[in-house]
Image (tube, rainbow, N blue to C red):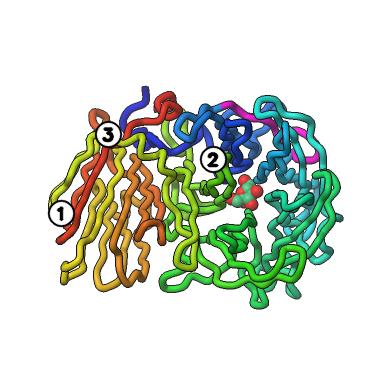
Amino acid sequence: MLKGRDGWRQRFHLMPPEGWLNDPNGLCQFQGIYHVFFQYSPNEPGPDGRKARTWGHYAGEDLLHLKFCGVPFWPEDPVDRDGCYSGSALVQGEEVMLYYTGNVKQPGDHDYTYSGREANEILVKTDGKTFGFKQTVLVNSDYPKDCTCHVRDPKVWQEGNSLYMVLGARVAGPDRNAQTDYGEALFYRSEDGLHWTLMKTLTTPERFGYMWECPDYFEIDGHKVLGICPQGLEAEEFRYQNIYQAGYWLVDGELEGEQVLHDFTEWDYGFDFYAPQTFVDESGRRLLIGWVGMPDEPYKNPTASLAARSWENCLTVPRELTWENGRIYQNPVPEMKELRYDETHIFPDQEMILPDGAGDFEISFLEGDEEEKWEVVIGDGLTLTYDEGIFRMELTEAVGCGRTIRRLQVPDIQFMRILVDCSVAEIYLNDGELVLTTRFYPAYDKESHDLRVSFRCGNAAITGWKMSCMQTNKELI
Ligand code: FRU
């Protein structure tokens, strides 16, 4: 049992047993079983003695009882030897087709952006337990000529009798640099899942970043959506605050015809959210899971250097997507509530202690609060405030490891839900209209993992619950 600083290990967020985790991959439910794969670099090298990015695998009968099932395949073949990068799952009858990008850096003197890198799209079929051989379905010469070597992250789905794949790409601009290159989505069609034909490319009339990673395409309530992770956007006062962003476009027009992208919206406004993926489960819900982390952040994740079993990052709780008021709302799947215990009604100026650092809070701001000003303090350094239409999420230098403030303009906040899990907070404003996710690192001591959550909320109805630990996480704490 690890104590002390590993009070930061979560109770109800999926994390790597040890080593590094990034994007969620291959999300699906197949014959009743949920599968959550993810980008993984275990601390131990792979079978060929090298440490390169691959997939990890969680599976289980429901989203609260997922078990770590190990590494389904390793980057040990000529088509993927520098990484089994991100990809998705498509359930087809009695099998699941997993598609991912095999990353290969050719030997020699290359910059790996404009030359020297292969991006192979690879298919592996599975019954959920055993994994078949790797079949390469697309290679560099199948991409449009103006693409750089950065093409990746296949998201695959079925419509009618055809299969479709969208890939994220960086297209070379006139100066071949990050200032003129631009992001684009490549759409392919297939009848058998093996042979794919380029159908069209899609981008914005105005350049929107130099690269689009991790695309996703789906319909919700009759609205077409293209999710992307653009790199290279300029930060604005209330938007695009992270090094890279994650959001979605609304899409006008038919998939097989011309389409227009409009109204880009960020999924999440916190410090740690990237590379989300959605899927439809067997009950028909559109669910989203994101990576709670950020690539290349100029901050050091302190869990990386723990003496025993270092680990980095986790996934968001599964979020259910709904279409409301002209946008997508996100909320934790209802089954998360099964982890709640010790329901407590909290006075608007009181506090609640979470003995294991894990809790869930619902706060309804009642009419008649003239001041419209409130504050919630989590642990010794994460503060949420609302004042004059501005919501602030602030971290102290120590607790944020250097990351300090995010601000949002919100004319009215009527409801807030906060999931607190040791070193992660997911904050849902107005029933999931706006979400902020962040890591934070309170100073837990060896003896106690108490986390104090205190409220100064004027006229509000506040209910808090302690949250129990998922079985998966018990084995990791
Ligand atoms: C996004 C990403 C993907 C890539 C993967 C590699 O975080 O850069 O584009 O497939 O991570 O781990």
Q: Is residue 448 above or below residue 411?
A: above
In the image, what residue type sits under mark 1?
Pro
**Residue annotated with mark 1:** 348
Q: Nearer the viewer, residue 51 or 72?
A: 72
- Which secondary structure dominates the residues rendered in magenta? loop
Could you say whether the residue bearing mark 2 is in a helix, strand or loop? strand
Badge 3 crowding class, 10 Å Cα cut-off, few under 14, some 14 to 19, many 20 or more, is: some
The location of residue 21, given as percent across then percent down, is 54, 40
Badge 1 crowding class, 10 Å Cα cut-off, few under 14, some 14 to 19, many 20 or more, is: many
On the question of residue 63 being in view, the answer is yes
Q: Is residue 66 above or below residue 192?
A: above
Tags 1 and 3 touching, CB below 8 Å:
no
Task: Determine whether, in the image, residue 289 is placed left or right of residue 73.
Answer: left
**Residue annotated with mark 2:** 21
Q: Quarter holding the C terminus?
A: top left
The location of residue 397, given as percent across then percent down, is 32, 54
Q: Is residue 339 above or below residue 368?
A: above
The location of residue 330, given as percent across then percent down, is 45, 54
The location of residue 189, given as percent across then percent down, is 80, 54
Badge 2 crowding class, 10 Å Cα cut-off, few under 14, some 14 to 19, many 20 or more, is: many
Q: Who's the residue at 83% across and 44% down the image?
A: 192
Label 3, label 2: how far apart the Cα atoms are = 29 Å
Could you say whether the residue bearing mark 3 is in a helix, strand or loop? strand
Q: Count how many numbered circles sit on residues in the image.
A: 3
Q: Nearer the viewer, residue 444 or 138?
A: 138
Please give the range of residues in magenta.
69-80
In the image, what residue type sits under mark 2?
Leu
Sequence-first disc among 2 and 1: 2
Is ligand 1 within 8 Å of the beta carbon of the residue shown at mark 3? no
Sequence-first disc among 1 and 3: 3
